[in-house]
Image (tube, rainbow, N blue to C red):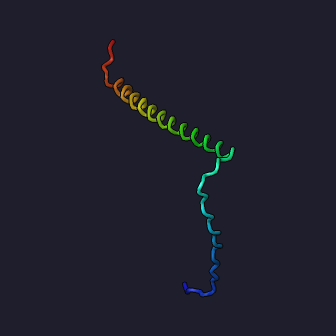
Amino acid sequence: MPESGSAEIIPFPSRPAASPAPSAKAEPTAAEARLTRALAGLNSAVIAQRAAVTAWRSALGDLKTVTGAVGQQPAEL
């Protein structure tokens, strides 16, 4: 396929320069404080869910062991 030199390159707009960070941290707004609490709660929920999934997988392993042993035992009359 022959190359064409008719394309126009459009540059992306440049980002404005970041303002320097203030030396003293301002008190968080109510919305920022609420977001911080929500993120902490979400993090706690994820940690609890990971523990629950680990326990569930362990229970599934135990169930597999028990059900595998059921077919291995001789039937008594």
Name, please, the residue furthest toward the top.
77
Name, please, the residue furthest toward the front.
24
Residue at 64% x, 78% y: name it: 10
On screen, 50 above or below 59? below
Residue at 63% x, 64% y: name it: 19
Residue at 37% x, 25% y: name it: 66
The quadrant the C terminus occupies is: top left
Depth check, front residue: 40 or 72: 40
Query: Count of labels shown?
Result: 0
**Residue 46, position in %: x, y?**
53, 39
The quadrant the N terminus occupies is: bottom right
Depth check, front residue: 30 or 67: 30
Q: Quadrant of residue 23?
A: bottom right
On screen, 65 above or below 74? below
Depth check, front residue: 61 or 41: 41
Report the side of 75 relative to 40 (left or right): left
Report the side of 23 relative to 76 (left or right): right
Depth check, front residue: 50 or 76: 50
On screen, 63 above or below 45? above
Residue at 64% x, 51% y: name it: 26
